[in-house]
Image (spheres, rainbow, N blue to C red):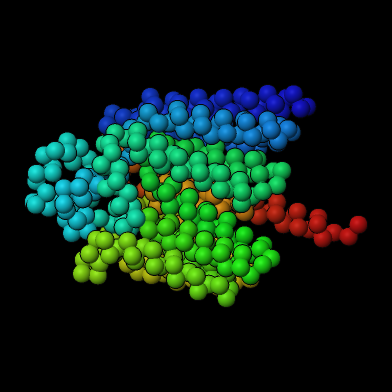
Amino acid sequence: MRRGQLARFSIALAAEIACAAAWNFFDDWTLEAMPVKFVATAMLCGIAYFCAVTEFRVISSPRVQAIVFWLVVVVLRVVALPLAPGDDFWRYQWEGKIQRAGFNPYVNAPDDPALDGVRQEFPDWQKINHRDFRAIYPPGAELLFRALSGISDHPLLYKLLFAGADVATIGVLLLLLGGESRYAQAAWYAWNPLVVYSFAGAAHFDSLMILPMTAGILFLMRTENATESKQKWLFALAASAAFGIAISMKLVPILLLLTCVFALRLRAVTLAISAGIPWLLSLLYGYPKVPIWESLGRFAHVTRLNDLFWWLIEETVWPNPHQKNYHYNVILIICVALISLLFWRNWKRGMIWALGTALILSPVLHPWYCTWILPLAAWRRAIPWYVFSITLFAYFLFWNERLFALPWHSEPWMRAIIIIPTLAAAGWFGLTQRTQRQETLRPL
């Protein structure tokens, strides 16, 4: 029996690595049908991934577990490095380059006539998305883009940094999980194809937000478990600083601050640091004279793509012909706050429920957004989110407009690919959890 499990585990791992490597044959999405082949390969990679992580416990030796675990982590990311970066990458480069030329990305949009001289030195300018919008990223991210632009324009530099932060997140996750099963649990995140593709492949910088956010959660746990008051205060300060750094990269961790209040209790006053760090960094870009958050608000007001929930409401009871989103974002914030309050006695569950609510109610859902919740899903053993991370690869069919005639609008069959397997997994997961609780409570 054990020999058969080991064979299945080895075959599944080899298949996942082979499929991830095969992405390199299908990353030129200017060619017809390439996105379809990429998505099909990603789905196969996801199936192999599920087989591999569920069979991980066949390795009984902790030392061998660690070796296999880290070897697969590195190999998966190495084979993804040659992939063509996503279109956000050109924005990172551009905003770093104009800062070095003396311009403020919160003042000058890419199509600003004042930037003609910079455009002539940037051959990939046409690849920049939303060229009429000024910078929408927080000041910590903009400082990073400036620093990287001064080193090299090669995508590999960015990918190595983003993948390195991702690997560091895995290390933090292992500390957060602890125990003998930590490698088996962490593999759900560490070997996940969407995580591998998003950072080592597509060069999205979200890993630089996920790392301090996960570290902040670890410090919250240390605060709770510490026995001395001084230690509790030090860990509370560390947690607040980590969340402040995360918010400086992307604003997403703001949604978790209410649950942080419940975790820290009287020490929640330290969360002033979480707001103070991005505020201090914003001063470097002229805030408050320069309205650095205005562009983000304008962008969030109108952008819309691949949402999970609002399309159903619009097609039944609440039409939205102009696809405006400002009211959706208000509802999202209110719902996240209510969910957080509901779990005031259990901040750990509250965090994943709050972030999950935000993803479900977001009017825009790019696949790499799902990576935000995956460390928490590994921590709380919420497997349906990992099913979702695989089905969400169907999003990349948007790039194959000539084949499917999808003008950035999700058709019902496409939504079904993404949503139905996740709902089925959530139902199965709920029933399994209920059965386990009943067996635990059953008298001997």
* Residue at the image point whose x is 61% and y is 68% from the top: 230
The number of discs equals 0
* Residue at the image point whose x is 29% and y is 46% from the top: 147
Placement of 150 over or under 36, stated as above or below: below
Estimate the x, y position of residue 89 in percent, counting from the top left: 30, 42
Residue 300 visible to an observer of this rendering: no
Position of 369 compared to 319: left or right? right
Estimate the x, y position of residue 304 in percent, counting from the top left: 32, 56
Position of 206 compared to 189: left or right? left
Quadrant (top left, top right, bottom left, bottom right) of the C terminus: bottom right
Residue 192 visible to an observer of this rendering: yes
Estimate the x, y position of residue 174 in percent, counting from the top left: 61, 46
Placement of 269 over or under 49, stated as above or below: below
Placement of 116 over or under 20, stated as above or below: below
* Residue at the image point whose x is 47% and y is 33% from the top: 77
Of residues 237 and 77, the one drawn nearer to the viewer in this rendering: 237
